[in-house]
Image (spheres, helix red, strand yellow):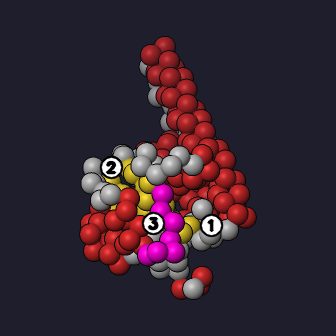
Amino acid sequence: MRYPQGYIFLNEQTKLPPLVTLKAWFGPKSEVYVKGVSAPSKILETRITLLEEIHRVAFKKSDYQMQCVAFRGTAVSTFFLTAMGGNVLKVYWIDSADKAKFIQSISRQIQNLIQFQCLLDLIEQTYRSMSNFIHTNTGRSIVGDDDIHRFFVGRRWGSTSEAEIHISQIAKNETRAGILQRFDLD
C-alpha cells in the first residue's frame, strides 16, 4: 500500500460492511485493507500490531480488543464516519517509509517503557518484602524512607516519570493520533 496510510481502530465487536462497500466509501483511488478479509499483507499486519501497542500504552487503553481498517488517503471517509463513527477508537497515520521505520523505533521504546514499569513494580515488591521482614523481626516500621514511600504511593495513584510522558507524547505526535483529515498532505 502506498503512502499516506490511515489506520482506523474500531471496537472489536463492530460489524464492518463487506470490503467492496468499504472501498466504495473511501473512493476509487483508495486502497483498503482489513486483516482477515483482504489478501494477507505481512507489512500491514506488522504496522497494525505496532499501532495497537502504541494505542494501548500511549492512551492507557489496554482493555480494548480492536480491529483495524487501513487505507491509503489523506482523510477518513465521511461515509465511513457516518456509518461507523461511534465505534472509532482512534485514527493513526503513517506518511512515508521513513515514518514507518520511526514507528518501529517508537515501538522499541514502548517495549523499554513496559520493561521499566515492570522493573519498578518488582522494586516495590522487593522493598515491601524487606519492610515486612524487618517489621516481623524487629517490630519496627521503616520510617526514614519518606521519599521512597512517596514515590511508590505516587506510582499507585498514576503518576508517571518524565520519560514515560515523553515516549507517549512522541508516539501520539508521530502517528498524528486522532486526526481525521490530513490537510498538511493534501
Hey, what amino acid is under mark 3?
Val
List x then y, in percent, for residue 144.
Answer: 55, 38
The reply to whether callout 2 and callout 1 are in contact (CB within 8 Å) is no
Query: Helix, strand, or loop for circle 3?
Result: strand
Hey, what amino acid is under mark 2?
Glu
The span picked out in magenta is 27-33
List x then y, in percent, for residue 74.
Answer: 52, 77
Query: Helix, strand, or loop for circle 2?
Result: loop
On the image, numbered disc 2 is attached to which residue? Answer: 12
Query: Helix, strand, or loop for circle 1?
Result: loop
On the image, numbered disc 1 is attached to which residue? Answer: 2
Magenta span contains residue 28: yes
The circle drawn on residue 91 is 3
Q: Which quarter of the figure has residue 97?
A: bottom right
> At x 54% / y 23%, what residue is drawn?
130
Look at the image and tell me whether residue 159 can be seen: no
Q: Residues within 10 Å of mark 3 (few under 14, many from 20)?
A: many
The reply to whether callout 3 and callout 1 are in contact (CB within 8 Å) is no
